[in-house]
Amino acid sequence: MFEGHDPYLVALSVVIAILGGYTGFGLTARIRGTPDAGHRLLLAGAAFFLAIGIWTMHFVGMLAAPLPPGTVYLVLPTIISFLICALVVGISLFFVSVGEPSVSRVLSSAVLLGVGIASMHYVGMHGLSGDFAMTHDTGMIALSVVIAIAAAYGGLRAFLARQGGVQLALSAVAYGVAVSGMHYTAMAGMHLVPPSEGSHHHVEGLAASSQMLSLVVALLCFVIAAGFLLSLVPDPRRKAAAEAVAAIPQTAVAEIPPADASAVPTSPRLRPTPLGGIGQPPRAAPAPRLPVEGADGTHFIDSAEVRSVRADAHYTKVHDGTRERMCPWSISEAEAQLDPGLFVRVHRSHIVAIPHVTLVRKEGDGAIVELDGPSPHRVPVSRAKIAEVKARLGLARRHA
């Protein structure tokens, strides 16, 4: 696959794909933690850096390949290849960054992203012009597309885990493997033959030499490197919110007595049960208030007003029965702080307040619960949590 390729340029192409992936995925991770007005800007920036990473990696790989002397690159197909790349990357990122990323949505995004990478590659290859004819092995074309889709799916899944910098780095590495693996697999199935040995069609049009392409690629490498360094700058919203939470007097938390049955309505359906079970270590005292961000700063709401908590990238959205507001805590931090006698994590991305549940209904493999308030809303319950939720609501006895 790499026979005759410049090993240093091959290594550089993989690094460029990884850096572009890290920058793009890092910007996408911030989409859910910003006001709606900034979503489009961040999505456009993420798509731009991911597309630039794919496109630049492709042409660095082309510069590393042993092409015949006199080979030039037609400008129009080269530009079209970048536009295809930017379009499919933007659409796939939109699918996984808006709403709950279901398996079908992530799989569709991975297929779109993989096919888009492959399309960009072969359109870009069509831009090669010289004294030769180009052929491709059908089997290698299919294999390159499968590699791109599989690795793109792995990268998106790692990104959606959102467990911090390590997961983001893993998603970027998987993304780099997706792009470079597809490219060099496709290159292994490409054959350049003299015009006399195959049909040759010289495409006329504006062309650029390898030297000109090298200058463009070098400039884009600097753009990607600058974007990568900027992505390492901490999110100011996250930092400000963390400082606001740290400023809460610790005595306020210490003075809150541990939750007991008297703190819950006496309805048998709302009887609290320990979340951790026998043998679990004692949990931290429940937080009296949750920080939420507003246009004028960070506010704090009493945990008794909370109906549900929903994971939203590195942050969460807290629903108070009227509307959702952004909280700087992660879903794990919220679970650790909230009273386990009142709150239960019903899904990997959702926590609900059991006293506010007004409806539970089976739906598909899981279930849904409805929370009360001026604006009632529904929350999904995973299949593994149905039995626990029913027990907390006093429904398990009916099936005993």
Image: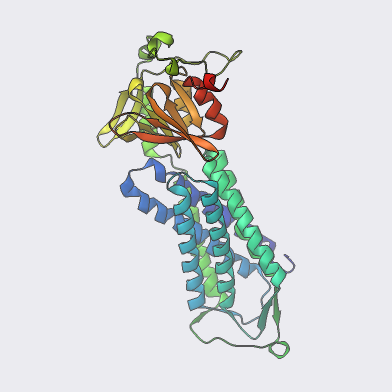
Residue 296 in the image: above or below residue 273: below
Q: Quadrant of the C terminus?
A: top right
Identify the residue at the far left of this view: 296
Q: Position of residue 285 (x, y in %)?
A: 44, 14
Using the rendered image of the protein, determine whether residue 56 is visible from the camera's viewpoint. Answer: no
Q: Position of residue 67 (x, y in %)?
A: 66, 76
Name the residue nearer the viewer: 397 or 384. Answer: 397
Using the rendered image of the protein, determine whether residue 322 is visible from the camera's viewpoint. Answer: yes
The mark total stands at 0
Identify the residue at the far bottom of this view: 196
Q: Position of residue 66 (x, y in %)?
A: 68, 73
Name the residue nearer the viewer: 188 or 396. Answer: 396
Looking at the image, which residue is at 43% across and 10% down? 261
Identify the residue at the far right of this view: 3
Residue 263 in the image: above or below residue 393: above
Residue 131 in the image: above or below residue 235: below
| 198 horizontally vs 263: left or right | right
| 296 horizontally vs 252: left or right | left
Looking at the image, which residue is at 59% across and 74% down? 125
Q: Position of residue 313 (x, y in %)?
A: 45, 40
Q: How is the image coloured?
A: rainbow
Name the residue nearer the viewer: 222 or 84. Answer: 84
Q: Quadrant of the N terminus?
A: bottom right
